[in-house]
Image (tube, helix red, strand yellow):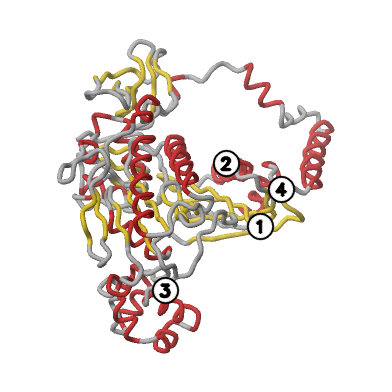
Amino acid sequence: MRAAPTILHLDMDAFFAAAEQASKPSLRGKPVIVGGLGPRGVVSTASYEARHFGVRSAMPMAQARRLCPNAAYLVPRFQLYRTVSEQVMELLGRLSPLVEPLSLDEAFVDLEAGGVAFGSAAAREAGERLRRDIRAVTGLSGSVGLAGSKMLAKIASEQAKPDGLVLIEPGTERGLLAPMPVRILPGVGPATGEHLRRAGMTTVADLAEAGEDELVRLLGKSHGASLYRMAAGHDDRPVVAERDTKSVSVEDTFDVDLHDRVRIMTEVGRLADRCVQRLRASGHSGRTIVLKVRRYDFSTLTRSETLRGPTDDPGVVREAAGRLLDSVDTTGGVRLLGVGVSGLADYTQEDLFAQAAEERAAEGRAAEERGEEEPVGEEAPAAAAEAEPVEDPAQRRWLAGHDVTHAEYGPGWVQGSGVGRVTVRFETPTSLVPGRVRTFRVDDPGLEPSEPLPLVEKTETATGMEMGIGMGMGTDGKVETVAGAGTPAGQESPLARRPKSRSEGGGPGSGAAMSRP
C-alpha cells in the first residue's frame, strides 16, 4: 500500500454511446443504445439518458426496446472506438511509462513511476489535467479515481461518474469501504456474494468483523485470505504495463438457429479467418485451436486440438476447426459459434505452412487425375477479385449508425433501412444543428459507405476546451466539489451537459433498424 494516492484509474464515461452522441449532433441529450440489433442482440452500452429508463449493458436488446422504445438503436462502430481509445492511451502514456489498459475505455496509471506525482496535490492536478486533455483531444469525458491501490482507485472512479474526479486519501480506506456491499471488492461475483449473504455478510464491514479465519473457512485459504485483506483496504497489486495475451477468439450469435451443416461449416471457416486476422494483428501465433458451439437448447460444447507447433496460417486454423466441428452433433440447431486460438507464441512453426501447402498440392493432383479443374491457389482469389465487377450496391447492408457519404449531400450516417430504402441524416461531429434527413433506394449510385469522421477538429485541440464540475474527495474522505479549469466554480460548463456513457462489454449482432426518439 502506498502512502500517497499515486495510482490513477481512468474510466471513460459510457464510451460507445458517448462517441456516437459526439459524432451525431441530433442524438446529443437523447437516449442512445449501442449493441446488436438482431432478435438475440445484447446491449453493449447505454447512454445515461437511456439508463434513466432502466437500460443496462449486457441486457437483451428486446428488453431494452420495451423499456426505452424511443431510443436511438445503433450498431457499434469499433473502428471509431479504437481510434479514440488510441488517442486516450497516448495521453496516459505521457503521464507514465506504466499504463495498464483493461479495455478500450479503461486503464490504470502509475503516476509515481512517471515522476508526475508523489503526493495528493500533485496527483489531483495530474488527474484534472488528464481530464482536460481528454476533453480537448476527443471531445469526450472520463472519470478519474486516485488512491494508494488499484482496488481503491477503481472504486474512486466509479464514485466520480459521470465526468468527475475522486481522490481517496491513504488512511481513510476502512471508513470508506465499511458500508459498501461485498460485491464492490474484486473477486466477489454473484456466486460468492450469495454465499457470503447466506453467512450473514452483506457489507465490507461484515467481512472485516468476521475475521480472516472465518473467511478462509467459508471460501478457502487463498480466496478467503485475499478477501480479508481487501476488506481491510489492503491491495498491493502493481500496475503492469504489459499483460500477456492468453488467447484470441471470435464468436457470432445467429438470429435464427442454423441447421444446415454446410452453412455451419461455412460460418466456422469465416470465423477462423477472422480469428487469424486478430491473431496476426496482435503479432502472435498459436498452437491450440478451440471451437465453441452453443446449441438450440443453450448447452455449450467446447472442443480443442493442439498442433505440433504454433501457427498463424488461416488454412491450418480452418482445417483444424473443421475437424473439431465433425465431432459435434448439430442436428437440433446451432445458435452460437466461436473459434479461438490459445497457447500463443511470437513465432510460427514453418513445417505447418509446408503441411498446409502439401495438402493443397495433393488435392490438386487428385483433382487432375479425376479430370477436374485444379483448385485455385491462395493468391489466385485476390487476382480474380480484381477482375470481378464492383460490389452491387443493392446487396449492401446499411447498418444503423454507420457512416456514409453521398455525391450530392456529403457525409452523413444511416438512420435506418428496410424494404429497399435507406434513410440518412446528413450531419457531421462539428455541425451546429441537427442535419437534414433524406431517404434513398438502397442501390442509389451516389451513396457510399465511408470512414468515421474525427470527433474533434485539430484546430480545437490547440486552444483547449472547457471542463465541467466534477466530484472530489477531501483529506477527510468526504466527497467535495472540484471545479474544472476554464469553468468558474459553481457554474456548469456547456460541455459538461453533453450526454455521456460507459462501455461494459457485449458485441455487435445483426440487423440495421433504428428507432428514433
Direction from residue 100 to residue 36 in the image, left or right? left
Nearer the observer, 48 or 11: 11
Nearer the observer, 99 or 314: 99
Direction from residue 399 to residue 281 in the image, left or right? right
Nearer the observer, 25 or 348: 25
Residue at left offset 62%, top offset 43%: 276
Q: How many marks?
A: 4
Spatial CA distance of label 1 from label 2 is: 18 Å
N-term mark: 3 or 4: 3
Residue at left offset 34%, top offset 86%: 210
Give the number of the mark in front: 1 or 2.
1
Give the quadrant of the C terminus: top left
Q: Can the viewer see residue 295 in this picture?
A: no
Spatial CA distance of label 4 from label 1 is: 10 Å
Q: Position of residue 38 (x, y in %)?
A: 36, 42
Residue picked out by circle 3: 234
Q: Position of residue 285 (x, y in %)?
A: 68, 48
Residue picked out by circle 2: 274
Spatial CA distance of label 1 from label 3 is: 33 Å
Give the number of the mark in front: 3 or 2.
3
N-term mark: 2 or 4: 2
10 Å crowding of disc 1: few (<14), some (14-19), many (20+):
some
Residue picked out by circle 4: 311
Nearer the observer, 20 or 34: 20
Residue at left offset 26%, top offset 56%: 472
Say which amino acid is labelled 3: His
N-term mark: 1 or 3: 3
Please, what secondary structure does the residue beneath circle 4 have?
strand
